[in-house]
Amino acid sequence: MRREYFRVVVGGLALLALAGCAAQKKPDPFKPYDLNPKLQERKLVPKVDNFIVVLDASGSMSEKYKGQNKVDIAKNVAHRINQTIPDMKLKGALRVIGQTYGPFSRQSKLIYGLTDYAQKDFDQSLQTVTFASGGTPLGASIDAAVLPLDLSATT
């Protein structure tokens, strides 16, 4: 009798655990926060004139994380940042690390800018990143990203 009761309890708990996993809520779709009203009301003040996004599309980014390629996750983050940038005078750039056809190649290339920032143009450049491959020349990429900036104006 006790053994039968134990089986029923364990079976019920297993069903509850499975039902709990199946009923996970999907996250809400991303809705960019509009910062333009705060910028116009001068509640936000621009702190930079330029920005550069360095996107890793090297071979390690072709691995999956929670069922999705890491490079797609990184592109999604960059896309969301792009959607949230308010309408203000900026110069922007997008530099990609990797994305080479040779698995041992090390490449960093500028695919957008440094030019007057336009949300649509930045996003179109981001969509050209279609795969991840190659090495990760991070140091050289950061050095190359800094070169077009006028750092003499910093205090």
Image: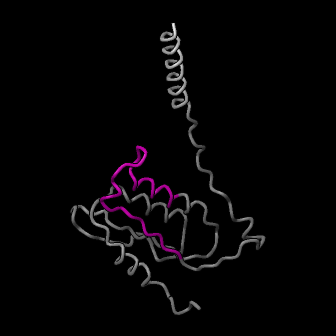
Quarter of the picture holding the C terminus:
bottom right
Look at the picture and state if 72 lies above or below 99: above
Q: Which residue corresponds to the image point at 29% horizontal and 70% vertical from the top-left? A: 107
Q: Nearer the viewer, residue 115 or 30?
A: 30
Q: Going by the image, does 100 lie left or right of 35? A: left
- Taking the spot 48% from the left edge, 14% from the top edge, the residue there is 7
Q: How is the image coloured?
A: one colour
Asked if residue 62 is positioned above or below residue 90 in the image, the reply reads: above
Question: How many marks are shown on the rendered structure?
Answer: 0
Q: Which residue is drawn at 75% across and 70% down?
A: 40
Image spot of residue 9 (x, y percent)? 54, 17
> Can residue 8 be found in the magenta stretch?
no
**Quick check: is 65 in the magenta stretch?**
yes
Single out the residue that lies furthest toward the top.
1
In which quarter of the view is residue 74 placed? bottom left
Left or right of 88 on screen, residue 117: left
> What x and y, as percent, mark residue 22?
52, 29
Q: Nearer the viewer, residue 44 or 87?
A: 44
Q: Which residue lies furthest to the front in this view?
A: 2
Give x and y (percent) for residue 119: 55, 64
Depth check, front residue: 36 or 9: 9
Please report the residue visible at 21 percent of the width from the left and 65 percent of the height from the top.
104
**As displayed, is residue 28 above or below residue 36?**
above
**Region of the chain picked out in magenta, as a range:** 51-79
